[in-house]
Image: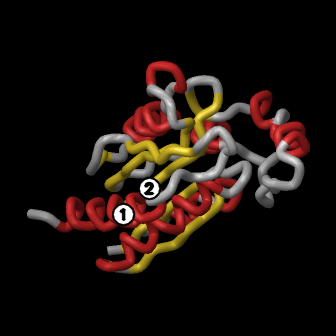
Amino acid sequence: MRSVVVYESMFGSTHAVAEAIATGLRRTGEVAIVPVEQATHEALAGADLVVVGGPTHAHGMSSAQSRKGAPDYVEKSHGDLTLEPGWDGMGLRDWFKELPDTPCAGAAFDTRADISALLSGRASKGIADRLRKHGCHLVADPESFLVGKDSHLLPHELDRAAEWGAALAAAFVAP
């Protein structure tokens, strides 16, 4: 099985989750981890499973406008956060607009604040909807991985992400 994990990340949490999911997926095959700006049609070609994730901003996927506030957030963190390479580039919303139909298995994840999803929203729901519109059949419900008020992942979230990746692989290969 060949999997591709596509992610958008501002401060590294979503990137770390993508890496952990890939660790779980590697138990059953080859995995490529690709930041959204490098997730070309060629990068996805031949993938059996495409897993896509990003941070939750304003109840959904980030936008060019919501990403503009990232440097201010880093400044207010007094050196506790850094910006990921490509943070100001293409986001998932724009990527989906350019993505051709990609018939394969798919899964969606997000990172979001550790509060009720009713209050924070979930980018993974919008990601899952767009994956379906592009021809993917979902092998799992959208999943959220939680960050604290400091924008760092909560303890054990990376372990949970690796387990989720293994469960995705198992669901994909199950009869």
Above or below 85: residue 2: below
Residue 134 appearing in the image: no
For label 1, count other residues whose C-alpha is less than 10 Å away and answer few (under 14), some (14-19) or many (20+): many
Residue beneath the point at 80% across and 54% down: 80
Type of residue at label 1?
Gly
Q: Nearer the viewer, residue 71 or 33?
A: 71
Which residue lies under the disc numbered 1? Answer: 165
Q: Nearer the viewer, residue 64 or 118?
A: 118
Residue 35, by quadrant, is bottom right
Q: Quadrant of the N terminus?
A: bottom left
Q: Nearer the viewer, residue 116 or 59?
A: 116
Which residue lies under the disc numbered 2? Answer: 51
Q: Position of residue 104 (x, y in %)?
A: 34, 55
Type of residue at label 2?
Val
Q: Position of residue 147 (x, y in %)?
A: 57, 45
Callout 1 touching callout 2 (CB < 8 Å) = yes
Q: Secondary structure at mark 1?
A: helix
Residue projecting furthest to the top = 118
Q: Secondary structure at mark 2?
A: strand
- Spatial CA distance of label 1 from label 2 is 9 Å
Q: Nearer the viewer, residue 66 or 119?
A: 119
Residue beneath the point at 40% across and 66% down: 162
Q: Is residue 18 left or right of residue 107?
A: right
For label 2, count other residues whose C-alpha is less than 10 Å away and answer few (under 14), some (14-19) or many (20+): many
Q: Position of residue 7 (x, y in %)?
A: 59, 54
